[in-house]
Image: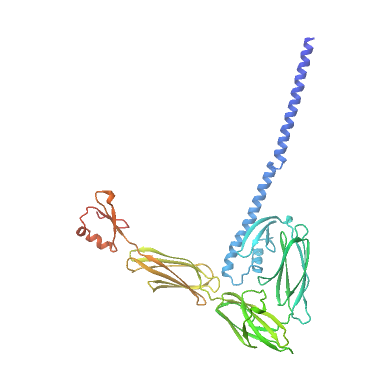
Amino acid sequence: MKKQKKRNKEKGITLVALVVTIVVLLILAGITLTYVLGDNSIFKQASNAKLKTEIAKAREKIEVVLTTVQVEKRTNIKYNENDFLDTYILNEIQDAEIIDDIVIIDGYAFELDRSVPKLGKYLGKKEELVFPSLTVSAPVLAENSRLATFTITAKEEKNGIHKIEIIQEGHVIKEYEYSNRKDEIIENCSVKQNGKYTIKVYAELSAIELITVDGIVMSVEYSPNGNEEYQKEHPVKVEVKETDDKVKSIKYQWLNTTVEPTQSSFIENCSNYETIIGKGYTGTYYLWTLLETESGKTNICRSEGFNFDNEGPTITNFTAEKYSETGITLSVTAEDTKAGIVKVEFYVDNVLRDTQTCSATTLSVTKSKTITDLSTGSHSCMVKVYDAKGNTSDQSVSGTTKLYVWEKWSSNPIKKYTEKRSAPREMRVAKNALYSCPVWKITRGWADCS
């Protein structure tokens, strides 16, 4: 009977141990599954690490190309931040895609800052992007052929649309803003100039469409009609195509924008077939004209852009460093993004001491020259930098040759003092006759002569 109870007790202990073992195994299995398959599992961590690596590789690809493009921007006259930039990227990176201001590399999307150009933030995978849809109707000319009208239709149901821009030659000429985001927007837009227009719609992301307007009959002909070459001045002949309604007056102004000005802003007058000379400007400017007919009708129109350069190069750094007791090293860094730098002149005490030339370049230029045979001491130093159109910039600094110092000691270290001498060689020869102090030493490159 006792043996039977003992066997039952052993069986009971065995069952309890089995249950405990199963529970422990289940707990361990749960922990293992969580570690392997959970949100912070090793597989998830490995997947995230792989994703970050792939994004970094994609970013590196485009950043290398954009570094080269920044050089093209400064050296290639054909560069622009739209077609040229897009074509360059697509030629350099296989299977790259560009959608508006977004570049997609290996399926990963990044913001593209076209103005620098440089890469912005990471936006996500290509398939995760939500772009607004945008359609623009074909332009329709008015009966008098003085303007063209087109219809813009934009949709974005997830995030809504908050702005539409009409852009010509890089300038926003019209803008529609919506304080409350809308799923769908329809706008009718009229323009008065022939040319290419960019329609850009903004939601969380953006979309663009390009249209070309032609057939608008301009009431003024400009000859030449624009010039991309940088000049100090541009002559433009204005010719009005008159109809039965004769022209009463012509007013004009030069502006650096394609946004149409108000009639009240026109002040200068000209006559038909007159040549107007634009001068004193820097950058891209447009000749705007205001016509008024005898019947009281008015019309505002403009030319294409003219590039002006009436500013000297930008001097970013100019230094005058000590070279010797009779010499100073002058160094300058400058740049000119328009006509380009062609010459640098160095002056000391208002005397031209050196001239260096180069082929016209819009890259940063660094030139230096060591001027010797100067008297020991301070000198007025100046640099003058020229661009290809004769514009100049100058900058002045004070330069000093090396001054050597003799140091005189007494037996008491507290009474140590220095005396500066402009002619250290003479001082060394004459020191025994002039001073009775037992110890003399020069501290700036001369041997100890104590």
Q: How many marks?
A: 0
Q: Quadrant of the N terminus?
A: top right
Residue 24 location (% of width, % of height): 72, 29
**Left or right side of 313 for 214:** right
Point out the image quarter for the C terminus: bottom left
Q: Position of residue 117 (x, y in %)?
A: 61, 63
The image quarter in which residue 353 lies: bottom left
Q: Residue at x 67, y 44 (%)?
A: 45
Name the quadrant containing residue 114.
bottom right
Q: Residue at x 66, y 85 (%)?
A: 250
Task: Please determine whether, in this image, residue 448 is positioned above or below residue 292.
Answer: above
* Residue at x 75%, y 19% (from the top left corner): 13
Residue lying furthest top: 1
The color scheme shown is rainbow
Locate residue 116 relative to residue 32 in the image: left or right.
Answer: left
* Quadrant in which residue 33 is drawn: top right
